[in-house]
Image (cartoon, helix red, strand yellow):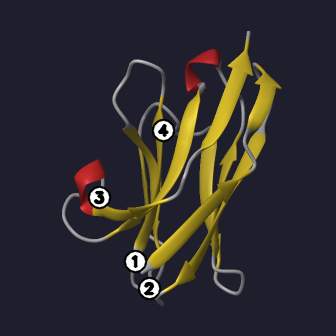
Amino acid sequence: QVQLAESGGGWVQAGGSLRLSCAKSGRTFNTYTMGWFRQAPGKEREFVMAINWSSGVIYDTNSVKGRFTITKDNAKNTVYLQMNSLKPEDTAIYYCAAFTGGNVYDTKSYGFWGQGTQVTVSS
């Protein structure tokens, strides 16, 4: 089994920054791709960014390109999401997840999820 724990969410004004962390434990999964998703009230969970733990290949979306950065720390078994120039539309619960096969942009391709951390951006 894999355990994921997010932290770092909070409230910030538009234009501000936050850094989310996702600490992984349990079964070794260096070959996993780790992803960040978000879900706003009344909306479906959507892909934000992902990083391949072995190769470092990064996947992103146009909505966060140039504003968000995903990185990893192998020694700490932690993946980070640095969010800059935040907008009110970035408000959501952010989830960390471990990819288990399929389309890296699809929630169904992730078999392990954290509990989520709330990010609120005020205008």
Placement of 123 over or under 13, stated as above or below: above
Q: CA distance from mark 3 to mark 4?
A: 15 Å
> Can you say which quadrant of the picture contains the N terminus?
bottom left
Dot 1 and dot 2 residues touching (CB under 8 Å): yes
Q: Give coordinates of residue 39: x percent, y percent.
A: 46, 33
Front position in the image: 1 or 105? 1
Q: Give coordinates of residue 104: x percent, y percent.
A: 29, 58
**Mark 2: few/some/many CA within 10 Å (<14, 14-19, 20+):** some
**Mark 4: few/some/many CA within 10 Å (<14, 14-19, 20+):** many
Placement of 41 over or under 108, stated as above or below: above
**Quarter holding residue 94:** top right
Q: CA distance from mark 2 to mark 4?
A: 23 Å
Front position in the image: 25 or 74? 25
Instruction: Kindly identify which residue carries mark 1.
Output: 32
Q: In terms of secondary structure, where does tag 2 sit?
A: loop
Q: Earlier in the sequence, mark 2 or mark 4?
A: 2
Q: Earlier in the sequence, mark 3 or mark 4?
A: 4
Instruction: Kindly identify which residue carries mark 2.
Output: 29
Instruction: Kindly identify which residue carries mark 3.
Output: 104
> Can you say which quadrant of the picture contains the C terminus?
top right
Instruction: Kindly identify which residue carries mark 4.
Output: 38
Q: Earlier in the sequence, mark 4 or mark 1?
A: 1
Dot 2 and dot 4 residues touching (CB under 8 Å): no
